[in-house]
Image (cartoon, rainbow, N blue to C red):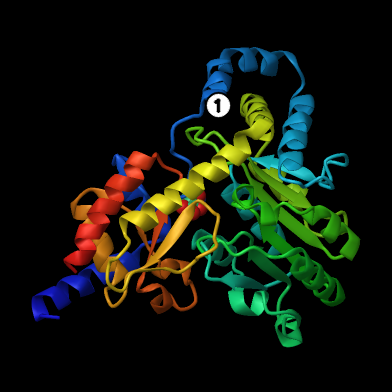
Amino acid sequence: MNSKLQSRVEKVGDAVAAGNLTQLEFLALNSSLNLADGHARQELTAGQAKIIARLPDLWAEAQERTVHEIEREAQESYFHLLGQHSYPGGDGRVLSCYSSSVAMEIYARALATTTDAVALVHPTFDNIPDILTGVGLRLVPLEEDVLHGGDLPVGLLQSVGAVFVTTPNNPTGRVLSEEGLRGLAAQCAEHGVVLTLDTSFRGFDTDAHYDHYAVLEESGCRWVVIEDTGKLWPTLELKVGWLVRSANVGLPIAKVYSDILLGVSPLVLAMVRELAEDAADAGLADLHDYIAENRALLRTELAGLPDIRFVDEDTRVSVERVHVGDRYAADVWARMCEHSVYVLPCQKFHWARPAEGDRLLRIALSRSPAAIAAAARVLRSVLLDT
Ligand code: EGV
């Protein structure tokens, strides 16, 4: 590398290192080629568009009926859609939040009253470590291979008050299997550790549709699950994050929730109910096909490029990681920005060891195929030139 290029790469690297992933996502918000954030931005399907056209009716319904009824219906539709039949809706253990990050912040504050350390999956989206450290918790990395490789080391479990797992993981798409969850829950029960799951990407992968709540409840462990409607449907940031907990969790979650929220809009809850019903009538399978087609399109557009690899071969989540060979992903990212095409360099997902993400980009797939194709063409030309 010549020295001018070297210094440019270093500058870009420093700029990327200074911010967090969401700050890089902000840069993309007003671009037509925003493939940065994991929110859904594709067009509404015909079925979804019909629901949106009925928003005035849902508004009227939300004014007339009790919030409690609509909330119960939204939860019922959403949790059953994704196979979570044993969710504890009946006894008020599901709290509705504006987003999964708000749910996580509430949980983190409650958790910090009883422990000072959490084992957190590595890598994962960086706002999770940031929220947890923001309330004063110390983080211990839990490598994905260790998580999926059988029992966790006892020393690790003894050193923390909670284990936090994103499943399917963001950005890798790795899913904790039913046997994996059962084993982990048994270990957490034995050590009194709060097993915490962030299942925001659950909707995309049927391998994550086994009944997690049945496994968790049977284990007797203390557990918390954060669910998210926000990744599935292109609803302009109207969404719900659900904060779900075991009866024995022993944390002031309801109190902290009350410090922050009275509740989410019943209009949004009614909309979520309708979208979940539409998804149950085939919309979810259509979404899976749509993401798979976008992934295939991206892989085809980039095929044949020297040193380019798709590292998560079997992933089904709505993001795709690309290994850019010897290039620095931050440099590729910066060059794409010059063409107003936005993706994410992956260092910050590797919150404990950022260098492990130096050669990886994450590309969002919940976009129109035209956007994927256009961005892929720019990426292709940048890669050929870097
Ligand atoms: C993803 C945005 C927050 C986050 C995006 C995300 N950042 N909430 N601070 O929702 O994968 O792009 O999860």
For label 1, the residue is 48
Frontmost residue, 334 versus 27: 334
Residue at image location 64% in from the left, 60% down from the top: 167
Which residue corresponds to the image point at 72% horizontal and 13% vertical from the top-left?
64
In the rendered view, does 49 fall on the left or right side of 374? right
Neighbour class for label 1 at 10 Å: few (<14), some, many (≥20)? many
State whether residue 85 is above or below residue 359: above
Q: Quadrant of the N terminus?
A: bottom left
- Residue 93: horizontal and vertical position, in percent? 81, 46
Q: Residue at x 39, y 50 (%)?
A: 297
User: Helix, strand or loop at disc 1?
Assistant: helix
Residue type marked 1: Gln
Is the CB–ligand 1 distance for label 1 below 8 Å? no
On screen, 96 above or below 215? above
Q: Position of residue 203 (x, y in %)?
A: 63, 47
Q: Position of residue 100 (x, y in %)?
A: 60, 48
